[in-house]
Image (cartoon, grey):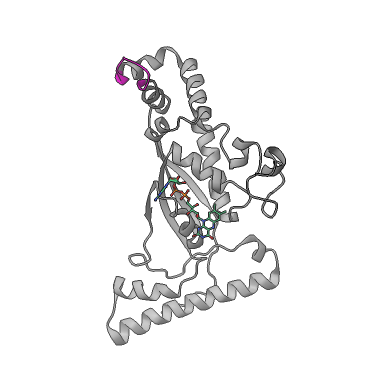
Amino acid sequence: MTFYAFMPKTTLKITLLEMSGKALELIYAACRQCYSEKSASDIFLSCADKPETVVAFIKKVVSSGHESPLEHVKFTFAVEGVSRALTHQLVRHRLASYSQQSQRYVRENDFDYIIPPSIEANKQTRDEFEKVMREIQKSYSKLLEIMSAEEGVRGESANQDVRFVLPQAAETKIVVTMNCRELLHFFKHRCCARAQWEIRALANEMLSICKEKLPAVFTGAGAKCEDLGYCPEGEKFCCGKFPLKEKILGAQ
Ligand SMILES: Cc1cc2nc3c(=O)[nH]c(=O)nc-3n(C[C@H](O)[C@H](O)[C@H](O)COP(=O)(O)OP(=O)(O)OC[C@H]3O[C@@H](n4cnc5c(N)ncnc54)[C@H](O)[C@@H]3O)c2cc1C
């Protein structure tokens, strides 16, 4: 069995696989249906004649907080070059769909890993980190070798147990689908300077894609302070971009 002297580190890559077609028309028709005697299908078709009215109306809907019409439009992203530490946080967002590369079915020979910038910046910490990654890879491969030879445990039965030695740094791939309402919520929490750096980088990339594809919904989106005009995180976590909540609203 080969042990790899060099193991690749990797970085974030996001691809927009798909978004709902006719997104503006969908949101407009769903929202207008609430207040109109007409059918949503007629409202949907009428959008072609008044694109500016549709955009202006949707911007008003988003800022008013009438968010349920936004649930009809979804974005699907392919995410790779992220750590298992990131996806553990990502999947806490329950109003979304996920399909993640399995460590049972995909053997982690020569696994890629994510190295945090603070560790990479210093030669001593980087060397130590990379040494641990190599040792884990070695043990992972050794365990698989022993199990297949002595115990006769092969394939996914071996993978599912041997993966217990893999680090949170191990690279993973995941497909994520969120609707616009959930995306706005996700950005509020994960674009915030308080969020962990890797999921913040992911959220910021997703946000710039969403802004480009659907500006009527996402132009003002981002960390919750962008919407509130103050920081609700308290002095310890405030990044300083906006004043603290207490400074704006007074002591509660
Ligand atoms: C900076 C930061 C630090 C964190 N630290 C920790 C930590 O130390 N430990 C930890 O365990 N987690 C931590 N989390 C995760 C956090 O507690 C949430 O689990 C995660 O952000 C998902 O948020 P959510 O539940 O609002 O999102 P979603 O699951 O996407 O839900 C969206 C919204 O839907 C509603 N909703 C969804 N499900 C329910 C439900 N069952 N009941 C009622 N309402 C519901 C809520 O309004 C919710 O805000 C942290 C998150 C952040 C951003």
- Tell me, yes or no, whether the highlighted magenta stretch contains residue 38: yes
Residue 32 pos. (x, y %): 39, 20
Q: Nearer the viewer, residue 74 or 136?
A: 74
Task: Please indicate, yes or no, whether residue 244 appears anywhere in the rendered image.
Answer: no
Locate residue 56, reporting x and y percent.
51, 19
Check the image and report above or below for 246 versus 168.
above
* Between 226 and 166, the one nearer to me in the picture: 226
Q: Magenta stretch mostly in which secondary structure?
A: loop
Give the answer, above or below, for where 245 lies relative to 142: above
Of all residues, the one furthest to the front in this rendering is 252
Decide: is 45 above or below 202.
Answer: above
Residue 97 in magenta stretch: no
105 to the left or right of 24: left
Q: Is residue 151 visible?
A: yes
Query: Measured from the top left, where is residue 141 in percent x and y?
Result: 42, 78
Q: Which residues are magenta?
A: 33-41
Residue found at x 46% / y 69%: 110
Q: Which one is nearer the viewer's eye here, 110 or 96? A: 96
Seen at 53% across and 69% down, the residue is 7
151 over 15 or under it: above or below: below
